Image (cartoon, rainbow, N blue to C red):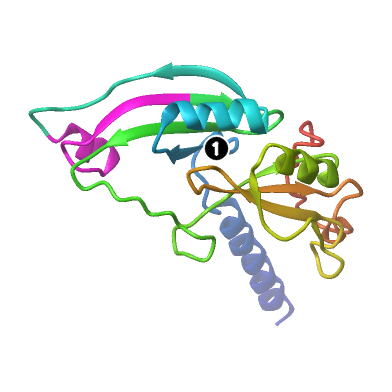
Amino acid sequence: MRNAIRNATLATAVLASIGTASAGSIPGMRGHDHTGVTVPDMKQAVDFFTEVVGCKKAMSFGPFADDKGTFMQDLLGVDPKAVIEEITLVRCGHGSNIELFKYTAPDQRDLQARNSDIGGFHIAFYVDDIAAAKAYLDEKGVKTRMGPLPVTEGPAAGQTILYFQAPWGLQLEAISYPSGMAYEKGAETVLWSPKTPEK
């Protein structure tokens, strides 16, 4: 009986470790490289990210199209006659890059997604002083939402947030948590932060 219990315990431990070892992950995945955003006017978008947000332009390339085949559909899931007029990548401080696309397509829509829409998204930038960020955005004429709003309860306590908007409607956020967030105490996994990119 004792051997049966010991063998069952050993089998359970081995099976549990196999499950842990085979947890899903893209082989070699290291982290978030960039977020791609389609914009209506490339100059306006580059100017906004470089002159207002403070990113730096790294490179531009394009155009890409396929007049005769389905390359664009096969590669990108867009209309076969879609054209990428230009792609520009910008680097934003100690964070991942933003890839800006200027497309034209027969079936192109202007989604103007809100944060509550399925598929909606926003890009957040860590700032050291969120009150200074708000004053700066106001001075630049950038549309901001309510805030800065300090979070005082729950696992995100310690952060302060402020949503703002690019001229063409893209949702953005300024976030700051200079003393960390409540969840970090005893957390097995701590979120990556551009304020301490080496961690």
Q: Secondary structure at mark 1?
A: loop
Image point 76% across, 33% down: which residue?
Answer: 197
182, above or below 81, in the image: below
Question: Which residue is under mark 1?
Answer: 29
Say if the magenta span includes residue 72: yes
**Horizontal and vertical percent for residue 37?**
45, 40
Q: Viewed as shown, does residue 85 lie left or right of 188?
A: left
Tell me the crowding category of disc 1: few under 14, some 14 to 19, or many 20 or more residues within 10 angstroms, Cα based: few
- Please give the name of the residue rendered at 63% of the width and 69% of the height, measured from the top-left corner: 12
Viewer can see residue 188:
no
The amino acid marked with disc number 1 is Met
Quick check: 136 above or below 143?
above
Question: Which residue corresponds to the image point at 59% horizontal and 63% vertical from the top-left?
Answer: 15
Q: Tell me which segment is drawn in magenta.
A: 70-88
> In the image shown, does 1 or 22 lie closer to the viewer?
22
- On whether residue 69 falls in the magenta region, the answer is no
| Residue 92 coordinates in the image, percent (x, y) | 65, 29
On screen, residue 34 versus residue 153, left or right, reads left
Q: Quadrant of residue 55?
A: top right
Q: Nearer the viewer, residue 143 or 122?
A: 143
Q: Which quadrant of the figure contains the C terminus?
A: top right
